[in-house]
Image (cartoon, rainbow, N blue to C red):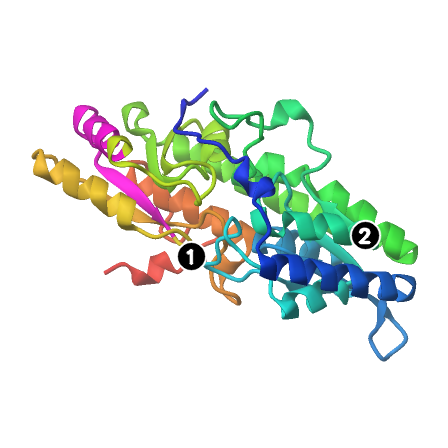
Amino acid sequence: MPAIRNSTTIANHGSLALSATCRGLLVLVLCVAGCEHASVRPADSGNGAALIKTLATVGMVADLVRQIGGEHTIVTQLMGSGVDPHLYKATRDDMQKILSADVVFSSGLMLEGRLQDTLKKIGEQRPVFAITSRLPTDMLLVPEGAHGHPDPHVWMDVAAWTSCMDVIVDSLSRLQPTHADDFKANAETFRKQLQALHEYGLSSIASIPKSNRILVTSHDAFNYFGRAYDLEVIGVQGLSTESEAGLQRINELVDLLVDRKVDAVFVESSVPRKNILALIEGAKSRGHDVKVGGELFSDAMGDEGTYEGTYVGMLDHNITIVTEALGGTAPAGGLNGRLSIATERP
């Protein structure tokens, strides 16, 4: 199993003290939720067909809900592309979106750090589900230094993320039993797509020379990716982007890059690049050139309306970028020939 490095505490995800603004929003949530609780019903499309109004916190969850709910749901995604869920602060408008939904889906495992307490309180009044809640403990990673908190970045292992679909199927089926068979059929269709994606990850990463399978990224979002596809994963920051990388940590990683002749490191779309650039400069000062192997999607997917703005596209991009940068072979357009990086190359 690949090594897991620098997995610092994520306890602050769920235990951050609420600011005065957050406390005010939470009071608003409880008041409005209490008033609206009795009136939560699926929306009507205007042609007699009931639609379930769903809210998903992050894109990776929202895409699963869209795939499973299909034509029977309206899906609102709270956090867009490039948004860091660890640091996300809900606004009053966000609260209204949450409270107008028939059902709310989060990733869970403290990913939505500052939103965690709010979702818990809303869950006392209406359906709120963390889709990772049923995962067996042996499927979760609990890195050293995390004080017993599981790593929340489960979607990086396609097989593990696929296991989260049952929570959505069951929840939607309870809200709309007449379409339960549709939800199950949609889920099975999507499982086949995810199985193909997982197999693509296995074969692509396997083409990287064993000595090159070192994935250095901005923060520890890729441990499940490393476990699934046999990569040693090293994050500059810990599991949460709220942790800071000190000078000692930077120097340790510069030593590693030089000693092990690592040629490529990776930036992330939702995390500042400064720490990765510091590694590159540090290695250069010691006579070793390191390049940016590419930008990976970690805590957020690509832009809405793009292939990379889907879960399949997000992982297809990551798998293909990592494979090529570390010396493996992968199709220019990825698994489905749809990656934008194929048209960006000279």
Above or below, 285 relative to 273: above
Above or below, 129 relative to 26: above
| Mark toward the start of the polypeptide (1 vs 2) | 2
Instruction: Provide residue 227's location: percent of width, then percent of height.
Output: 48, 27
Which image quadrant is residue 71 in? bottom right
Instruction: Provide residue 45's location: percent of width, then percent of height.
Output: 82, 75
Residue 26 seen in the current view: yes
Which residue lies at the image location 71% right of the left edge and 62% below the top edge?
Answer: 98
Which residue lies at the image location 88% right of the left edge and 50% below the top edge?
Answer: 174
- Give the magenta part as a residue range: 250-268
Residue reaching furthest to the front? 20
Quarter containing the C terminus: bottom left
Above or below, 256 relative to 18: above
Amino acid type, label 1: Leu
Instruction: Provide residue 142's location: percent of width, then percent of height.
Output: 55, 26
SS type, badge 1: loop
Residue reaching furthest to the bottom? 46
Which residue lies at the image location 64% right of the left edge and 66% below the top edge?
Answer: 94
Labels 1, 2: front one: 2
- Near-viewer residue (208 or 249): 249
Q: Residue beneath label 1, please?
A: 339
Classify mark 1: residues with Cα within 10 Å, few (<14), some (14-19) or many (20+): many
Residue 138 is inside the magenta segment: no
Q: Residue beneath label 2, please?
A: 127
